[in-house]
Amino acid sequence: MARMEARMLDRRKLLLGSAALALSGCKVFDSATDRDSALRNLFASHEGLTRAAQRAVIGDRLAPEFSEADIRQGQRPNGSVNPDGAEYRRMAGTGFRDYRLTVTGLVDSPQSLSLADLTALPSRTQITRHDCVEGWSCIAKWQGVPLGTVLKLAQPKLTARYAVFQCFDAIERSLSGEVFYYESIDLIDAFHPQTILAYAMNGAPLPVANGAPLRLRVERQLGYKMAKYVHTIELVDSLASLGFGKGSYWADRGYEWYAGI
């Protein structure tokens, strides 16, 4: 068991190191961010194999969890840190009292849940490491409701395969309008016990910079998978109609969709 865990940690370091190398200026990888890039398509063609191999190795195993003594620094924010949309700013100004999480799509019982509704559900607390594709990591304590608990309330249809997360943070602005962050995971990861919708961090309400009022934590994947400022979860049978069809904002721009570690 110890040897297996050591191999898993070595693999995490290798993946993070490789990602950091790719982001550090290696020109040979520059074209991989182009949607029509042959290099990008080559990488994407092997992603399913990578995902299958990882799941065969780790199965339902939990990501490593730590003690409070291991929390030695504040949780560094990733991605957006302060959405400036009018609706979000209004809710933030009232402590998110009128925030609602919508659960829709391929479900038999669509949900609209307030923050109070979510905090009243059974919660999970976990101290885990956030690994960013840029090469840094932080350990923090997260508290939230298991995503599986919320999805069970909505009663997924048998045809549902993915959970899509829509967020309040606008990543791009252009003449054609704003592009808000979007992400997705499959229902295997959605029902993993460590996949939670976090509303607290290090014993306090989730800060705005870290995704208030609600963010995804999917602990066996890289940080960009953990969508912040989530307002809608839609269950779908295909990702083809989401963004450019790759499954997430960053996958549409050359990153791996699964991003497992």
Image (spheres, helix red, strand yellow):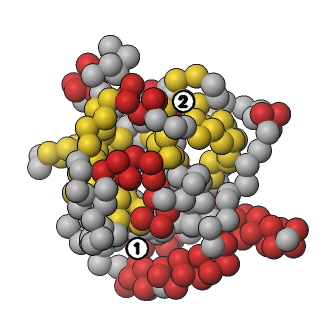
Crowding around mark 2 (Cα neighbors within 10 Å: few <14, some 14 to 19, many 20+) is many
Could you say which quadrant of the image residue 99 lies in? top left
**Answer yes or no: do the residues labelled 2 and 1 have beta carbons within 8 Å?**
no
Q: Which residue is mark 2?
A: 200
Q: Is residue 138 visible?
A: no
The residue lying toward the viewer, choosing from 139 and 96, is 96
Q: Residue at x 49, y 73 (%)?
A: 29
Q: Residue at x 54, y 30 (%)?
A: 200
Disc on res. 90: none
Q: Secondary structure at mark 2?
A: strand
Q: Quadrant of the C terminus?
A: bottom right
Q: Is residue 202 left or right of residue 169?
A: right
**Of 18 and 5, which appears nearest the observer?**
5
Q: Kindly identify the amino acid type of the residue bearing the numbered disc 1.
A: Ser
The amino acid at mark 2 is Ala
Seen at 45% across and 53% down, the residue is: 148
- Look at 59% across and 76% down and name the residue there: 55
Q: Is residue 102 above or below residue 14?
A: above
Judging by the rendered image, the residue that carries numbered circle 1 is: 31
